[in-house]
Amino acid sequence: MQKLLLLCLLFLGLSFSSFAQNLVKSDVITYDVLVFENFAKGDMRFVRQGAPIKYALKSSPKQKQQGVFEKVVDKNIIIDGQSIPLSDLAYIKARVQSDKKMIGGLLAGAGIATTAFSVGIGNKGGLAMAGLGLVATGYGISLITSAKKFNFYKGWEVSGGTLEYIR
């Protein structure tokens, strides 16, 4: 009993000391972000610096362009070294982090596992499971790779900001 108590105390003491060391030597990471807000829907999304984006300008809405987001300076967005006023943007299409990506990853993994498992069954039930697995895999991959279109004519507003977190 005493050995167990001593072991528990040592474990707690060591875990708190390693936790404190992580807090002391933490790094602050800062990224420039595009902040998209839709006040009517109460929705807010972020696109991080270095993300590939597609966009169209109000001055030439038929011409679609693409580049890498660098930063926002004085109400201008910098894409591949080119400065574009935020007020001239018609839309921006970019990949954003969301719950859908996690669900897509889970579906893709489950679909691949189901397909692999159903190959060993070999009857009509196995064929149906393989079909279901392939559908789940396809849908999961589409959720992972999908991009969100922020149309500024439909309630979305864009601004620049910075995102800081401690690592």
Image: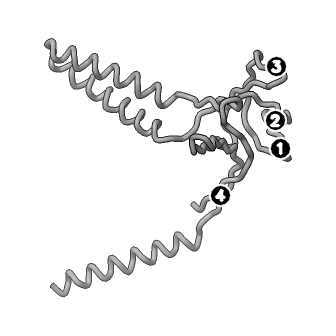
Rounded to the nearest angstrom, the CA distance separating label 4 from label 2 is 26 Å
Disc 1 or 4, which lies upstream in sequence?
A: 1
Q: Position of residue 61 (x, y in %)?
A: 77, 19
Disc 4 or 2, which lies upstream in sequence?
A: 2
**Amino acid type, label 4:** Glu
Front residue (pair 18, 53): 53
Going 45% across and 78% down the picture, which residue do you hit? 17
Q: Secondary structure at mark 3?
A: strand
Q: Secondary structure at mark 4?
A: strand
Question: Which residue lies under the disc numbered 2?
Answer: 87
Q: Is residue 119 above or below residue 15?
A: above
Q: Secondary structure at mark 2?
A: helix
**Horizontal side of residue 40 vs 140, given as left or right:** right
Rounded to the nearest angstrom, the CA distance separating label 3 from label 4 is 35 Å
Q: Position of residue 43 (x, y in %)?
A: 57, 43
Disc 2 or 1, which lies upstream in sequence?
A: 1
